[in-house]
Image (cartoon, rainbow, N blue to C red):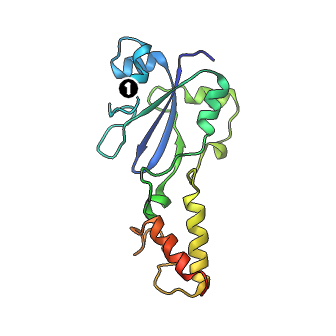
Amino acid sequence: MNNNYYGVTQLSHGHEYRWIFRGKVLVEALGLNSEEEIIDCSGKDLLFPMGGSNASCMWIEKLESDEAAVKYLLAEGDGPDSDDPSLVDIAEYRVTVSNDSNSCTQEIIEKFALDEKDLSQMDDIYHHYAETEKMIKDLKLSGYKDFDYDNPYYGKNRDMKYSELFNLWMSNEGI
């Protein structure tokens, strides 16, 4: 692989999207003069590859090898854009590898025969989803009544922060 490939990440509604672009495509899409300017665009809201008020700025990483590109696509997602996400944010967090916006992502996927199940993620590096599932199950087993077990992520507890669930779980652990 050439050194002119870049990994781009952007969040929309807490959902993380990843692409791989050729440098020349980014130069054109971002209205730059040269590839040397690409990394300077990282962390800026340039309405690319997604625009709109619910899309975050894009983050760009230069990929130096084929192995770096594969690793980039398969890396665990950082997670919702909050240190203490709500239950609904945890439920809606996903990583999707995208092949639109004139990216070359699909070429990398095909070249290395990456499997769709390896590219889709629903938990973050802190395993918030897996941890909330365990805590919710333990709370239910403990007999704690004031929780919406039928709809924990979208019901009355949707705005509960991870830390609040953790504190509730800790206080009810011995029941």
Q: Nearer the viewer, residue 15 or 81?
A: 81
For residue 150, say whether it is visible.
no
Place of residue 38 in the rendered image (x, y in percent of width and height, measured from the top left)? 42, 20
Q: Residues within 10 Å of mark 1 (few under 14, many from 20)?
A: some
Residue 20, position in %: x, y? 53, 28
Residue ranking furthest to the top: 33
Q: Which residue appears farthest toward the right when viewing the image? A: 113
Q: Residue furthest left?
A: 53
Q: Looking at the image, can residue 68 be seen?
A: yes
Instruction: Identify the residue shown where x is 38% and y is 26%.
Output: 41
- Provide the residue designation for mark 1: 41
16 horizontally vs 66: left or right: left
Side of 2 where 156 appears, left or right: left
Quick check: 95 above or below 150?
Answer: above
Q: What is the count of numbered marks?
A: 1
Q: Position of residue 136 (x, y in %)?
A: 56, 74
Residue drawn at the location 60% of the way across and 76% of the way down: 137
- Residue at 49% across, 59% down: 90
Tell me the quarter of the picture where residue 105 sits: top right
Residue type, mark 1 in image? Cys
In this rendering, is residue 15 above or below 175?
Answer: above
For residue 124, above or below residue 99? below
**Residue 19 locus on image (x, y percent):** 51, 32
User: Disc 1 on helix, strand or loop?
Assistant: helix
Quick one: quadrant of the C terminus?
bottom right
* Residue at the image position 40 percent from the left and 34 percent from the top: 58
Q: Indicate the quadrant containing the N terminus: top left, top right, bottom left or bottom right.
A: top right
In the image, residue 12 above or below residue 143: above
